[in-house]
Image (cartoon, grey):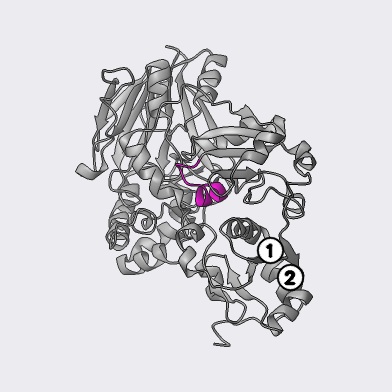
Amino acid sequence: MFMRTIYDEKLAQAAYLFGCQRTGEAIVIDPARDVDRYIDLARDNGLSIVATAETHIHADFVSGCRELAERVDAKVYVSNEGGPDWKSEWLEQKVGGGTYRYKKLHDGDVFAVGHIEFRVVHTPGHTPEHIAFLVTDRGGGADEPLGLASGDFVFVGDLGRPDLLESAAGQAGAMEPSARQLFQTVRKLDAIPDFVQVWPAHGAGSACGKALGAVPMSTIGYERRFNPAIRAADNEADFVDFILSGQPEPPLYFANMKRVNRVGPNVLGGVPTPAELTVAELRALDAKRVALVDTRPWDEFRVGHVPGAMSFPLRKTFNTDAGSMVAETDDIYVVIEPDRLDEAVRDLIRIGLDHNRGWFDARNMADYESDTYSLRMIAEVGVADATAMLDDRQVTVLDVRRAAEFADGHLRGATNIAHTRLASRLDEVPGGPLLVQCRTGIRSARAAAFLQKKGFDVVNLRGGIVAWEQANGAIETPETR
């Protein structure tokens, strides 16, 4: 059996390519949308992708199953569990007419790709329809599974969060029943041997859990012994409290992903190539009406950027930041160095931001300025200046950390709105000049640029609350309150 993990560092997302070397057939489980990566990997190893499968309707990226079905006529395997609201609706809507080759799966179903067997285990809790796949290499003579493609059920060190239907998709009252369902699902691990490997769909940095480990895979036995969420499942009430507490605020785009992946993503047929903009075309853009994404480092952006531009450097948080502040309907223009354009476009289409209209070479930003056009700045201050501004009541503090971080300690009088939810809560942002602050100044930089685009007067706190505490600035904590 051939197996490779294809990992996206920014989304902390893993797809798995399994191939039968005897028959040359392969399957991809939980693919992302730019499927050329999987096709090329399979071909380079003497394999052809004949099938693709999803563990569930994803919330954090656009599924590539439909794209693979169009590109290589892959047979699609999806869950048929979870009730009528949790079905893939695109299976009979092939581009140009007709139906994809597909099979809807139930708990206990078995299918094969070559001599590799996949047994379906219904694992609800993260979502009602969620399934996992026990993988057995029959071609190698095995009669027990080697591993579990666990999707968002079991992670290394965590379980898939059960609150997203409520916190991301807006289904009021869904999180506690989902948590109780997840408690029951954990019992299914009892029937799986300790030696079975765990191949999760996400790693550290994903918003699909709160404490995912950075180790790429594990075993059922290890997780049974040391996974805090599984160990908390001795008692249902305690488990519900544990699994729901401290979950990070999900990025805004999560709600869109559920809908897109259910009804069917648009088929791209390849990675789009936006047109290069001239300086005149950049000047002609109305950045209040489009999404102008500037990927330069913050220190370059803050001292001179096109008015209305947003600051999203191409770091690990790029997808989360852009998905929280760019709408899926926005026309997108990117300020970027040419050799990173493909990377940025892939990142954007992976989260459903498809309207990539143009790009401008970041190395030529100085050419923007003229007698008519000026670059704009964002003020940034250290702790001493921020303290003086607060003492003189010149600014109001906006803390854009997660609610759990804020609860542990914050600047007195601060308003808390997580930067991943800011676009949906602009009516809660205080008036007047804002001192925008996070832990180290990175998330607040993203928020400050977005707020400036929306017309707010902002100052970023350099170094964030870490610098504030190092300078012995006053912090309001649960104890002082």
Image quadrant in which the C terminus is located: bottom right
* Residue 135 placement (x, y as % from top left): 39, 31
| Kind of residue indicated by mark 2 | Ala
Mark 1–mark 2 distance (CA, rounded to whole Å): 7 Å
Please say if 120 is above or below 225: above
User: Residue 25, located in which quarter of the rendered image?
Assistant: top left
The structure residue drawn at horizontal position 68% and vertical position 63%, both measured from the top left corner, is: 440
Earlier in the chain: of badge 1 and badge 2, it is 1
Please say if 430 is above or below 106: below
- Residue 467's label in the rendered image is 2
User: Residue 293, located in which quarter of the rendered image?
Assistant: top right
From which residue to which does the magenta span run?
320-330
Q: Are marks 1 and 2 in contact (CB under 8 Å)?
A: yes
Judging by the rendered image, the residue that carries numbered circle 1 is 440
* Residue 11 placement (x, y as % from top left): 54, 43
The structure residue drawn at horizontal position 55% and vertical position 21%, both measured from the top left corner, is: 41
Dot 2 surroundings within 10 Å: few (below 14), some, or many (20 or more)?
Answer: some
Instruction: Spot the residue most to the bottom.
Output: 480
* Residue 119 placement (x, y as % from top left): 31, 32
- Would residue 271 be found to the left or right of residue 113 on screen? right
Where disc 1 sits, the SS reads loop
- Would residue 258 be found to the left or right of residue 340 on screen? left
Q: Is residue 385 magenta?
A: no
Please say if 444 is above or below 20: below
Dot 1 surroundings within 10 Å: few (below 14), some, or many (20 or more)?
Answer: some
| Kind of residue indicated by mark 1 | Thr
* Residue 236 placement (x, y as % from top left): 30, 65
Instruction: Spot the residue most to the front.
Output: 371
